[in-house]
C-alpha cells in the first residue's frame, strides 16, 4: 500500500520573475579581496561576494506590485501623492496618526534623540543597537541595558529573550529618578541579542510601570512584524490573531515608533518616524527639513514612498512572514546536524554563530567574530558580519573596549532573495570552517574610526 503523504512542508508564497547573476570566485581571489578589505566584510566589494548574508537591510527583493508602484512615483517637491498613500498605511498598520518620512532608520533615531534627550539623561533599553545607542549618546544620554539576563546567554532556549527585566528597569528609575528618563527605548525583536522577541505580556508590564512614573515608551519597530509573528506562534491567546492585529496592539503601548523601512517593508531605502504626540510631531516635522528634505518626502523619492506603502500591505501577510522566518529556521536545523553552535532559539532575521564558542582559543581582544566572518568569506565567498566586541565599540567614559558577553557572526537573510540551495551551500561552508576551527588565528585592529567602528575598521592577521 502506498505510504500516506504527511503535508508538513511549506514553500515561499511567490515565484521568481527576475534574476540577478552572482558568481563564485577562487580562494586566491578571495584571499586578495579580504586582505584589501582589512579583514572587514563591510569593506569588500559586493562583486567579490557569492552569497551575501551581510544584512537584510535594503537588500530585499521587491514584489511586482512594488516595482509597478515605482512607476507611479509622483516626484513633486511638495505634497507627493505617494506620501499620502504611505501616511495612510502608516496609520492603518502602526496605528500612529502623525508621520514624518526619513531616508532611513538612523535619521529618525537622530531626530528622536535630539528632541527628547537632555544632557545627563538615561535611556533604558532592551539591549543596545549600534546606531540607536550612538544617537542617544550624541544627544547627551547614557544608555542602560535592562534586557533579561537570558538574552546574554546564547544557549538559553526561552521564547522571549527580548523581554525587559522589570527589576532592572525599576532599579534604574529608583537610582536616577523618572525625571532623568525621557523614554524607554524598546526594540522587537532585539537585533544584537540574535533576533529575539519580547512578549505582549512583558510589553504590557513595562507599559504599566512606565505609566506609573509618567515615562514614555518608544518603539524601534524596524522588524516589528517578526516580533508579531513570534507572539502569534509562541504566546498564549495570540494564535488566532492576525499579524496585523498583533502589530497594531504592540504599537498601541508606545508614544511613538521609528522604523528602518529597509527591513520589514521589503524596500531598498526608507525610514519612518510616527507618533501619537502632536507636539513631538510638529518638532520632528520642522527638524526634518533641516536634515532630510521637505516633510512630504524626507530624503526619499516619491517612487520609494510608493514602494514602502505597498510593502506595508505585504509585510503583514502571514504566508510571507512565515516563509521568511521558516528559512532562518531551516538554516538552524541544518547547522544542528553538525553541532555548530549559534544563538538559540532561532531568531527572526538571522542565524548568529557563537564565535566565542567556535573560536574558544582566541581571547576576545583578538576579535573572534571578526576573524570567523573573514574565514567564512575565505572559504566560500559567503559574507556575514561581526556582532561582538568590534560592534560594541568603546565605553564612553573609560575609552576601553566594551566586551559584550555575546561574540557573534550574523548571517542575515535578505527577504525573498535566496533559495534553500543557497542555504545548503552556506551551511556546508560554515561546517567546513567549523571543522577547521583549531587552525584559525586571530586579528589585530590597525585602523579604528571614531564612530561605529565595525563599518570601517581595518584589521591584520596576527
Ligand atoms: O540602517 P538604518 O539607518 O535604516 O536603520 C538603523 C537601524 C535601527 N534599528 C535596528 C533594529 C536596526 O537593525 C537598524 C539597522 N540595521 C542594520 C543596518 C542591520 O544590518 O541590522
Image: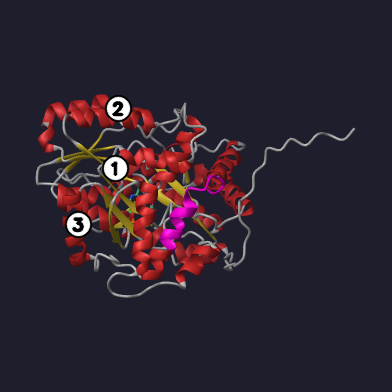
**Which corner quadrant of the image does residue 251 belong to?**
top left
Residues drawn in magenta: 307-320
Instruction: Identify the element where label 2 is drawn.
Output: helix
Q: Position of residue 225 (x, y in %)?
A: 44, 45
Between the residue at mark 3 and the residue at mark 1, the CA separation in whole angstroms equals: 23 Å
Q: Earlier in the sequence, mark 3 or mark 1?
A: 1
- Please say whether residue 56 is visible from this viewpoint: no
Please, is residue 82 above or below residue 173 in the view? below
The reply, left or right, for residue 405 in relation to residue 398 is right
**Which corner quadrant of the image does residue 193 belong to?**
top left
Q: Position of residue 378 (x, y in %)?
A: 51, 57
View extreme (right): residue: 1
Which residue is identified by label 1? 128
Between the residue at mark 2 and the residue at mark 1, the CA separation in whole angstroms equals: 20 Å
Is disc 2 surrounded by few (<14), some (14 to 19) or many (20+) residues within 10 Å? some
Q: Is residue 333 magenta?
A: no
Which residue is identified by label 3? 284
Which residue is identified by label 2? 205
Q: Position of residue 278 (x, y in %)?
A: 19, 50
Q: Between residues 59 and 222, which one lies in front from this camera angle? A: 222
Which residue shows up at 41% across the image and 65% down it?
Answer: 306
Q: Earlier in the sequence, mark 3 or mark 2?
A: 2
Dominant SS of magenta comes to: helix
Instruction: Identify the element where label 3 is drawn.
Output: helix
Instruction: Identify the element where label 1 is drawn.
Output: loop
Can you tell which mark lies on residue 243?
none
Please, is residue 163 above or below residue 427 in the view? above
Report whether the residue tagged 1 is closer than 8 Å to ligand 1: no
Amino acid at each position: 500500500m502506498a505510504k500516506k503523504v504527511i503535508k508538513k512542508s511549506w514553500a515561499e508564497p511567490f515565484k521568481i520573475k527576475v534574476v540577478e547573476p552572482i558568481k563564485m570566485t577562487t580562494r586566491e581571489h578571495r584571499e586578495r579581496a579580504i586582505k584589501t578589505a582589512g579583514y572587514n566584510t563591510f569593506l569588500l566589494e559586493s562583486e567579490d561576494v557569492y552569497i551575501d548574508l551581510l544584512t537584510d537591510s535594503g537588500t530585499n527583493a521587491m514584489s511586482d506590485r512594488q516595482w509597478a508602484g515605482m512607476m507611479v512615483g509622483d516626484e513633486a517637491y511638495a505634497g507627493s501623492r505617494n506620501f499620502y498613500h504611505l501616511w495612510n498605511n502608516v496609520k492603518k498598520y502602526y496605528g500612529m496618526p502623525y508621520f514624518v518620512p526619513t531616508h532611513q532608520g538612523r535619521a529618525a533615531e537622530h531626530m528622536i534623540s535630539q528632541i527628547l534627550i537632555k544632557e545627563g539623561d538615561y535611556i533604558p533599553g532592551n539591549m543596545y543597537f549600534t546606531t540607536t545607542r550612538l544617537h542617544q549618546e550624541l544627544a547627551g544620554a547614557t544608555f542602560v541595558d535592562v534586557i533579561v539576563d537570558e538574552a546574554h546567554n546564547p544557549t538559553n532556549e526561552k521564547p522571549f529573550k527580548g523581554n525587559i527585566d522589570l527589576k532592572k528597569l525599576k532599579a534604574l528609575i529608583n537610582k536616577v529618578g523618572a525625571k532623568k528618563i525621557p523614554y524607554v527605548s524598546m526594540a522587537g525583536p532585539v537585533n544584537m541579542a540574535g533576533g529575539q522577541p519580547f512578549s505582549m505580556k512583558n510589553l504590557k508590564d513595562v507599559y504599566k510601570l512606565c505609566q506609573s512614573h509618567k515615562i514614555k515608551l518608544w518603539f524601534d519597530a524596524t522588524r516589528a512584524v517578526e516580533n508579531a509573528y513570534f507572539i502569534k506562534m509562541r504566546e498564549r491567546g495570540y494564535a488566532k490573531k492576525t499579524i496585523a492585529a498583533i502589530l497594531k496592539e504592540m504599537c498601541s503601548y508606545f508614544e511613538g515608533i521609528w522604523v528602518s523601512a529597509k527591513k520589514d517593508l521589503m524596500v531598498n531605502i526608507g525610514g519612518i518616524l510616527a507618533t501619537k504626540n502632536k507636539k513631538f510631531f510638529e518638532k520632528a516635522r520642522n527638524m526634518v527639513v533641516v536634515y532630510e528634505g521637505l516633510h512630504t518626502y524626507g530624503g526619499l523619492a516619491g517612487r520609494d514612498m510608493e514602494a514602502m506603502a505597498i510593502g506595508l500591505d505585504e509585510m503583514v501577510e502571514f504566508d510571507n512572514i512565515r516563509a521568511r522566518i521558516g528559512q532562518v529556521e531551516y538554516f538552524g536545523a541544518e547547522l544542528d546536524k553538525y553541532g555548530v553552535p549559534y544563538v538559540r532559539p532561532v531568531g527572526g532575521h538571522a542565524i548568529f554563530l557563537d564565535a566565542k564558542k567556535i573560536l574558544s582559543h582566541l581571547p576576545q581582544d583578538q576579535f573572534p567574530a571578526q576573524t570567523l566572518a573573514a574565514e567564512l568569506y575565505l572559504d566560500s565567498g559567503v559574507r556575514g558580519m561581526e556582532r561582538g566586541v568590534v560592534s560594541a565599540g568603546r565605553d564612553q567614559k573609560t575609552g576601553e573596549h566594551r566586551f559584550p558577553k555575546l561574540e557573534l557572526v550574523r548571517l542575515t537573510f535578505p527577504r525573498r532573495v535566496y533559495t534553500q540551495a543557497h542555504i545548503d551551500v552556506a551551511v556546508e561552508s560554515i561546517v567546513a570552517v567549523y571543522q577547521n576551527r583549531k587552525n584559525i588565528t586571530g586579528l589585530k585592529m590597525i585602523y579604528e574610526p571614531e564612530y561605529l567602528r565595525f563599518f570601517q575598521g581595518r584589521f591584520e592577521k596576527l
